[in-house]
Image (tube, helix red, strand yellow):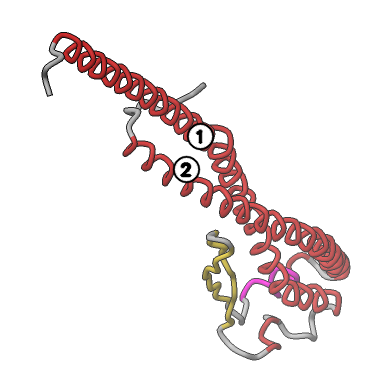
Amino acid sequence: MAVLNVNPTRMELTRLKKQLNTALRGHKLLKDKRDELMRQFLDTVREVKVMREETEKKINLVHTHFLLASSVMSKETLDAALMFPKQEVFLETGKKNIMSVDIPTYDYKTRTGEQSDIYAYGFASTSFELDDAVGGLAELLPQLLILAEKEKAVKLMADEIEKTRRRVNALEHVLIPRYQDTIHFIAGKLEENERSSRARLMKVKDMMIEEQITYKRNHPDAV
């Protein structure tokens, strides 16, 4: 039996009972947190799986367009078309809290609001395959940021689930049983002490009665 190193007193018993109640409440809250995190984790994993498959298909399509463009355009013309971009992208980061886990959020802004500024070249000397590739990449950017956000959320939630699981196990298998064993031990000690005290009192009472009887026998005229 694993018991804490405390004095078996009523004050310690009261204190340990309060700590046990606190530990039980904390155990329930942590279990609820773990279960809710697990639910959101599994939902996010499923979303990530679908998004990743869609994103990879789109990336492969963009890659195909680039390959087609490079097959109909010279390397020098292709490099020159992409060398001086007109548009500029600024990444903005933030945070959102999910069950005490800080999940990063990503957003972006462009230097200009003109959609056509993604094309840094004139259309006369380039192929439409290059236009499709550049346009496809521009459309992919928001989805890539969402995917990165969700994949990071999956990792952070997995770490938090593992930490919460360890805390739940520590409370459930170590701390709470130790409190319960210690409370049981102190209660037993106090009950044993109470029985011993009652036995001593009974013995003292019997001795006092016996002394009174002996005194009266030796002093029959005493009042």
Q: Residues within 10 Å of mark 2 (few under 14, many from 20)?
A: some
Note whether 210 is above or below 190 in the view shown. Answer: above
> Which residue occupies the foreground of this view, 85 or 30?
30
- Quarter of the image that includes the C terminus: top left
Q: Main secondary structure of the magenta part?
A: helix
Task: Identify the residue under disc 1.
Answer: 180
Residue at the (79%, 74%) spot, across then down: 136
Q: Are marks 1 and 2 in contact (CB under 8 Å)?
A: yes
| Residue 167 image label | none
Label 1 crowd bin: few (<14), some (14–19), many (20+), radius 10 Å = some
The picture places residue 43, in percent across and down from the top left corner, at: 76, 61
Q: Helix, strand, or loop for circle 2?
A: helix
Q: In the rendered view, does 47 fall on the left or right side of 20?
A: right
Q: Residue at x 64, y 64 (%)?
A: 149
State whether residue 25 is above or below residue 68.
above
Residue name at image x 59 percent, y 75 percent: 107
N-terminal of the pair, mark 1 or mark 2, is: 2
Q: Indicate the amino acid at tag 1.
A: Gln
Q: Is residue 137 left or right of residue 98?
A: right
Tell me the CA gap for discs 1 and 2: 7 Å
For residue 200: magenta?
no
Quadrant assignment, res 112: bottom right
Question: What residue is rendered at 55% in x and 69% in y?
Answer: 96
Percent coordinates x, y for residue 208 in the rendering = 23, 18
Task: Give the farthest residue toward the front.
Answer: 221
Specify start and end residues of the magenta stretch as a single range. 77-84
Secondary structure under tag 1 reads helix
Q: Mark 2 highlights which residue?
A: 20
Percent coordinates x, y for residue 108 in the rendering? 59, 76
